[in-house]
Amino acid sequence: MKDLQDSEGILPDGSVLAGLASKAGEHWTYRFMYTPEGVVTFVNDACCRLLEQTTEKLEGKNFLLLVPRENALEVRDMVFGLSPGNPFGLVLQAHHLPAGSVLRQLWRHGAVFNEQGAVVSYFAEGREW
C-alpha cells in the first residue's frame, strides 16, 4: 500500500482506498479465487495468459504463486489481515513479462465471511494500471 501512496501521490491524507475509488469501479481483467488455506479454486483465462499457464496447472496451487515474488509478503499480510470490518485490500504490483517488459497492475483482494465472521473464501481481481 505504501507503494501506491509514494509512487502515485494519490491522497495527501494517506487514504489509498478513497483515492482509488474511481479505479475500483472500472473493469477488472484478471480474476482468481482461493480458499482460506490459500489454495486456488478458480482462475480466469486472462490470468492463465498472463502467467503463461493452464487452468489445470494453476488451480490447486497456493495463491501466492500467482503474485510477483517481490509482492508476495505484502499481499500475504494484507490478505490474512482482512476482516468483516475491512474485507478488501488493494496492492499495486509489477509483473515482469518474459519479453522483459513490466506490466503494472492494481489488484483488489477480498474476503467472503460467514455469519460467524470466519472467512469462507477469498477472491482477487486485477487490472492494468
Image: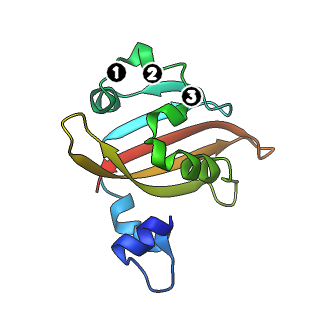
Residue type, numbered disc 1: Gln
Q: Secondary structure at mark 1?
A: loop
Question: Which residue in the rendered view is the most extreme toward the front?
Answer: 100
The quarter of the picture where the C terminus appears is bottom left
In the rendered image, residue 8, in percent from the top left (x then y), is placed at 34, 72
What's the residue at 52%, 48% (across, down)?
A: 109
> Is 24 left, or right, of 99 in this rendering?
right
- Spatial distance from mark 1 to mark 2, Cα to Cα? 7 Å
Nearer to us in this view, 77 or 27: 77
Residue type, numbered disc 2: Leu
User: Which image quadrant for residue 31?
Assistant: top left
Labels 2 and 3 touching (C-beta < 8 A): no
In the rendered image, residue 24, in percent from the top left (x then y), is placed at 39, 59
> Is 51 left, or right, of 2 in this rendering?
left
Circle number at residue 62: 3
- Spatial distance from mark 3 to mark 1, Cα to Cα? 14 Å
Q: Secondary structure at mark 3?
A: loop
Q: Crowding at label 2, few (<14), some or many (≥20) Cα neighbours within 10 Å?
A: many
Q: Which residue is mark 2?
A: 58
Labels 3 and 1 touching (C-beta < 8 A): no
What's the residue at 40%, 67% (across, down)?
A: 20
Mark with earlier residue (3, 1): 1
Labels 1 and 2 touching (C-beta < 8 A): yes
Q: Crowding at label 1, few (<14), some or many (≥20) Cα neighbours within 10 Å?
A: few
Q: Is residue 100 above or below residue 88?
A: above
Question: Which residue in the rendered view is the most extreme toward the right?
Answer: 116
Q: Which residue is mark 1?
A: 53
Mark with earlier residue (1, 2): 1
Residue type, numbered disc 3: Asn
What's the residue at 62%, 32% (across, down)?
A: 38
